[in-house]
Structure formats: C-alpha cells, structure tokens
Image (cartoon, helix red, strand yellow):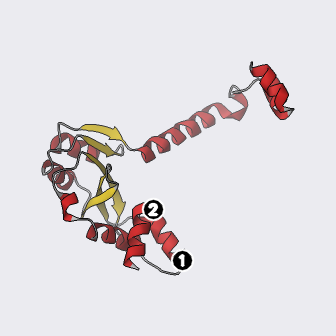
Amino acid sequence: MAEIVRLIGHKMGGRPGEYLMHRLGMPVSDDTILRQLKRNNPASMQEDNIRVVGIDDWSWRHSSRYGTIMVDLERQSVVDVLDDRSVESAKAWLQERPTIEVVSRDRCGLYAQAAREGTPQARQVADRFHLVQNLRAAIKEQMSVYGHAHVRPILSEDAIASATGSEQGLFSQTR
C-alpha cells in the first residue's frame, strides 16, 4: 500500500491523491501522502544539486496550520516539507542550496521575500497553476465588468453561419 500511496502522491499530489485513495477504498489523508513522498525521497535529492525549485504552501489541518513544500521541478520530486509557512524557514532552506537558479512560486509576498533573501542569484517565476488561475480571474473580471452583451464577438456573423453550415463553406471563407 505504501508503494501505491507513493505513486498516486507523485502523480496527483496530496488532496487529489487523498480523494482517489478514498474512492479506491484505501482511506489515506493528504498529509500521509506527502509524508510518504518525503520518506521515499533519496538522500541524494536533498543535497545541494537542485537547480529549479518550486515552493508552495499547503494545509496540515484543513486551513488551521500551514507548511511549505519544496519540489525539485527538474526531477519532479518532493525534496522537503517544512513545518511552517514563514520567511525565515524558507529563506534558511534556500540559503543551504547555492546551486538554485530558478524559484517557481505563487504570488505570495512571503515566498518572494524568502527567495530574494535566501537565493538572490535565482530568477523568480510564477508557477503554471497560479498563471492559469490569474488568467481565469482576469477573464472573469473582464466578463463581469463589460457584461456578456457588450463583449465584442470573436467571430463575425458570417463566420458563425458558415461554421454551422458545411465544412466546405468554412474552408472557402478562410482562404
């Protein structure tokens, strides 16, 4: 079962992995899944050879206590799980690894400060999840500001009519 927990945790993460494990009849908490990932992580991965690290927070006890997860994004492996969500602990962890070149993080100022102070040589980038989340929020905001009736249509009425007609009509209009 430990191997199943590790594989599901590696591919899905904590909370989605917890949901799947419950559906499979093997109830395991997201905390246990993350601990299993950390336990099975080879010691060599925790050395100073990390170039690209992802930093994010996560909840130990359903929004009552938070920790920080460090992921080697090149190897797609959890490197460490810190017991808190603070500038000091993230900064100290980063300072111990001078080979870090890129820090991928959310827009939280806490991790921005930790990266600035802990790895001043590293470039900070936004992670994919938060880029998509921010794009979705911007689109939603624009749609609510202008309303659906005032948004300029992407396709003209002629293009819509031809798209609902035959394929031949669509291709002849786009040429």
Closest to the observer, 7 or 83: 7
Which of the 4 image quadrants contains residue 157?
A: top right
Residue 82's place in the image compared with 138, above or below, is below
**Residue 24: assigned label:** 1
Residue 96 as seen in the image, left or right of residue 123: left
Mark 2 secondary-structure assignment: helix
Mark 1 secondary-structure assignment: loop
Q: Amino acid at mark 1?
A: Leu
* Alpha carbons under labels 1 and 2: distance apart: 14 Å
Badge 2 is on which residue? 12
Residue 28's place in the image compared with 79, above or below, is below
**Residue 140: assigned label:** none
The disc, 1 or 2, on the residue closer to the chain's N-terminal end is: 2
Image coords of residue 128 (percent x, y): 43, 44
Q: The N terminus appears in which quarter of the rendering?
A: bottom left
Image coords of residue 133 (percent x, y): 48, 45
Residue 5 as seen in the image, left or right of residue 82: right
